[in-house]
Image (cartoon, helix red, strand yellow):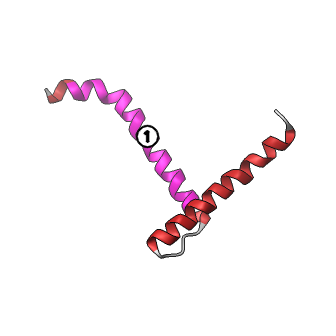
Amino acid sequence: MKPGRVSARPALELAMMAALAKAITRAARTNVDVETLKVLVIFSGAGLLVSLVAAMIYGQALSADLF
């Protein structure tokens, strides 16, 4: 990997977040801050991760009890 590519990645992610914030702003007609969007994405990802782990751990036991 080249050193320039490593430093460009955070800038690319920030640009993607800003584009997503603009799209949400246009669709909802409200002002959405990039930092708020980052917090929502982090908590949504954490909730999805916890749900997937719980489904993996308890999936077999729940399916046997339902039927």
Residue at horizontal 79 percent and vertical 41 percent from the top: 6
Q: Amino acid at mark 1?
A: Val
Where does the image place residue 44, in percent across and percent down from the top left? 47, 51
Magenta-colored stretch includes residue 48:
yes
Magenta segment's dominant SS is: helix
Residue at horizontal 16 percent and vertical 30 percent from the top: 66
Give the farthest residue toward the right: 3
Question: Residue 11 lies in what quarter of the image?
Answer: bottom right
Magenta-colored stretch includes residue 37:
yes
Circle 1 sits on which residue? 50
Q: Please report the bounds of the magenta region as a residue range.
A: 36-63
Where does the image place residue 58, in percent across and percent down from the top left? 32, 29
Residue at horizontal 61 percent and vertical 63 percent from the top: 35
Q: Is residue 22 left or right of residue 50?
A: right
Q: Is residue 40 above or below residue 25?
A: above
Q: Is residue 14 above or below residue 50?
A: below
